[in-house]
Image (cartoon, rainbow, N blue to C red):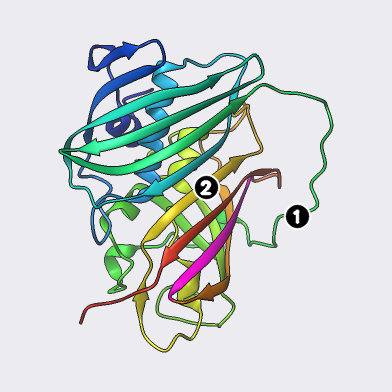
Amino acid sequence: MDVHFQLDRDLNIQSADCSQTSEDQWLIDVSISDQWQVIVGPNGGYLGALLLAGVKTVNPPGLQFVRSVAVNFISPSVPGPAQLSIQCIKQGRTTSLFQSKLNQGNRNIAQATVTLASDRLPISFCDPTMPQIPAADTLKPMNWSRTNSDFAVPFRGHYDQRVGLGPIPGEKDDSGRIGGWMRFKDLRPIDDLGLLAMSDGWYPSVISRNLPQAVHVPSLDHTLHFLCSDFSSFDPHAFVGFEFVTEIAAAGYLIEDGKMFSESGQLLAISRQMAAMVPFEV
């Protein structure tokens, strides 16, 4: 990790903080940063990246790449000391499976199942195509400090976010669809950790719908499937294209699907999360 970048400073894990307790289990002392706050506690994308960073610490990069990260959010957390508990469920020749748990005090804050696997057959196809988004340099960056939106939360200040699909907060088109371009303001290069953090960095697409009352939508779970294993050729100045859609809600819960594209239109990852719809307190 390069501590010149904010995300890496806030994920930084030192070898001295890691202890192996058995052949397949590790404990890692970490600190939950105060730089990624949302309405209650840190952003889920940041917590997911912290869980993944723990796995990558005990399982250094090799011929297996991160293919999926499935995060469950269990309890609210606060900035400060915490501990990762990492367990290797399977260490195979082509596929490995890890479970990463984030604990604070006597509470389990979040946990993730991380699947790593090597490349297999050279067979590729991709039916989804990148939506038509105006070029990033033709769109103005969102200036959250100049809006009174309920979604103007502190962690968004780390991103250069440019809306190119759907309405901005405060406007509605009832599509349940939003998106555009995003990159880190400090131009941190894109990799699996950065893409996981960014995948939960947009405001929720459900806000474009005409709901009977205003809600915020804390995530219960968030899964990201990676379709790119080599990020070395990406320009640090490049944006990632995002499209998020909420087409399903029932009993006060919704499902949001997301796609992440390179500037050239390559599909980098897809996400799905379930969130609760909670009334905003007046």
Q: Which residue lies at the image location 15% right of the left edge and 38% below the top edge?
A: 105
Name the spot of residue 77 as percent of width and height, x first. 22, 48
Q: Quadrant of the N terminus?
A: top left
Helix, strand or loop for disc 2 = strand
Badge 1 crowding class, 10 Å Cα cut-off, few under 14, some 14 to 19, many 20 or more, is few
Tell me, for residue 207, which label it has, or none: none
Q: Is residue 172 above or below residue 72?
A: below
Q: Which residue lies at the image location 56% right of the left edge and 41% below the top edge?
A: 238
Assign the magenta stretch its main secondary structure: strand
Q: Earlier in the sequence, mark 1 or mark 2?
A: 1
The total of numbered circles placed on residues is: 2
Disc 1 residue type (three-letter): Thr
Observer able to see residue 11: yes
Q: CA distance from mark 1 to mark 2?
A: 20 Å
Which residues make up the magenta segment? 252-262
Q: Which residue is denoted by mark 1 in the rendering?
A: 129
Q: Which of the two residues, 142 or 64, is positioned nearer the viewer here? A: 64
Residue farthest to the bottom, as pictured: 212
Q: Which of the two residues, 237 or 165, is positioned nearer the viewer here? A: 165
Disc 2 residue type (three-letter): Thr
Q: Quadrant of residue 150?
A: bottom left
Badge 2 crowding class, 10 Å Cα cut-off, few under 14, some 14 to 19, many 20 or more, is many
Q: Is residue 252 above or below residue 141?
A: below
Look at discs 1 and 2 and give the one toward the viewer: 2
Lateral position of residue 18 relative to residue 204, left or right:
left
Q: Quadrant of the C terminus?
A: bottom left
Name the spot of residue 204 as percent of width and height, x first. 45, 66
Q: Which residue is denoted by mark 2 in the rendering?
A: 223
Q: Is residue 255 magenta?
A: yes
